[in-house]
Structures are given as structure tokens and as C-alpha cells.
Amino acid sequence: MWAIKRSYFLVAAFILQASCDNNKVCEMKEWTECQFASSCICKNIHDSEELVADCSNKNLLRIPRLQNNLQDLSLQNNAISTIQDGIFEGNYLLKFLDLSFNRLSKIRKKTFKGLKNLLSLDLSANNLKYEKMSFESSAFHVLENLQILNMKNNFHTFILARFMETSDIRITVNRLCIGQNCSSF
């Protein structure tokens, strides 16, 4: 009886291995523990040395020292309240950064230094307040290639008119005010 079950198991394993191209089970197998943080999982991007890293839902209090070959990093739904200046230096390959659903309350001028190729930044659902100077608009100027900035579900997050006029960034916020004109999003 055991020999028959073992044969079926081997056949099933062979079929699973052979059909791995578009299978979620195989996709999960590609994820491994990240070298920079054992609580995060990483996977290579299409036969390259670049990585996607998922550090979501890990109760992280701070951003770990990162590898320089990250292209996509998710740190959503943690307990990160501050971002150490210079933590992203050397991460010039990073294109997508998700810091949503954390406890960020302050973004300084050098917070994003080193992310010159970042395309998308999600800061939604944090504790950022423009009127309390939670962030300096100049913090975003180092993000030369940024195309998407999500600031939804922060408290009264307003963007300076001069920042809007000098960028081609698609910004998603609760309310957007330029001068006296305000719109809700």
C-alpha cells in the first residue's frame, strides 16, 4: 500500500514541478529569507541579481540596513515611526517603496537621499501633517524620477504650490490646496 502512495506522491511532485511556470505554489517557493533581515522575504527578478523584498506585517520598529540590489521594497503595515537619515543611500536601483500603514510622523530633508531612481512612493495611512511640518517639501526633491506619490489617509496633508508647479508627479492626497483653491481626492 505504501509503495502505491509513494508512487502517486512522486508522480504528483513531478507534475507539480513540470507545471511550475504560472503556478502560485511555485511562486511562493521562489521567496527566501532576505540577507538583510530574517523577518523579510526576498525573490530575484527574472534571472537578475535585483530583488523584490517583502517586509510587510512584521511589526518592524525601524527600517533595517538594506542590500543595494533591491528594486521593490514593501514595508507596509509595520510600526515604523521614523526613517533614519541615509538609510537608503546606495539603493539607487530601488524603484518602488511602500511605507503605507506605519506610524511615520516626520520626514526630513535627507530621508530619501539615495533614491534617485525611485518611481513610486506610498506614504499613505501614516501620521503626516503638513501644518505641523511633519515633512519638508524639499525631502521629495531628491526623488528625481518619482512619478507616483501616495499621501492618502494622512491628517490634512497639503502640498506646497511651488512643489506642484515644478513636478510631473501624480500625487494622491486627501485634499490638495494650491493657494485658496482646494480639491478633495
Image: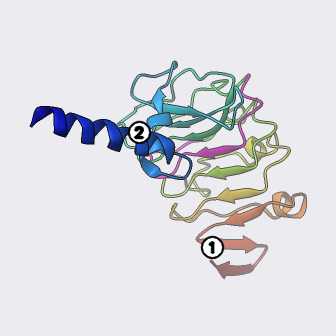
94 sits left or right of 125 in the view: right
Which residue: 33% across, 44% down? Answer: 12
Q: Could you tell me the amino acid type at mark 2?
A: Phe
Q: Is residue 46 left or right of residue 100?
A: right
Question: Visible in this render: residue 104?
Answer: no
Looking at this view, name the residue that lies furthest to the right: 166
Q: Would you place residue 118 above or below residue 160 in this image? A: above
The percent position of residue 154, horizontal first and vertical second, equals 52, 60
| Secondary structure mainly formed by the magenta segment | loop
Mark identifier at residue 175: 1
Quarter of the image that includes the C terminus = bottom right
Q: Which residues are magenta?
A: 90-106
Q: Residue 64: which numbered mark, if any?
A: none
Residue 85: give x, y in percent of width and height: 64, 26
Residue 67: percent from the left, percent from the top? 62, 21
Q: Look at 72% across and 61% down and name the residue there.
A: 159
Among numbered discs 2 and 1, the one appearing first in the sequence? 2
At numbered mark 1, what does the secondary structure look like: helix, strand or loop?
A: strand
Location of residue 172 by image quarter: bottom right
- Under mark 1, the amino acid is Arg
User: Dividing the picture into quarters, in which one does residue 150 lie?
Assistant: bottom right
Which residue is tagged 2?
Answer: 14
Query: In the displayed structure, would residue 123 be above or below residue 178?
Result: above
| Number of dots carrying numbers | 2
Residue at 63% from the left image edge and 25% from the top image edge: 87
Going by the image, does 92 lie left or right of 81? right
Asked whether 63 or 36 is in front, the reply is 36
Q: Is residue 171 magenta?
A: no
Within-10-Å neighbours for mark 1: few <14, some 14–19, many 20+: some
Residue nearest the observer in this picture, 119 or 27: 27
Residue drawn at x 49%, y 24% is 34
Q: Quadrant of the N terminus?
A: top left
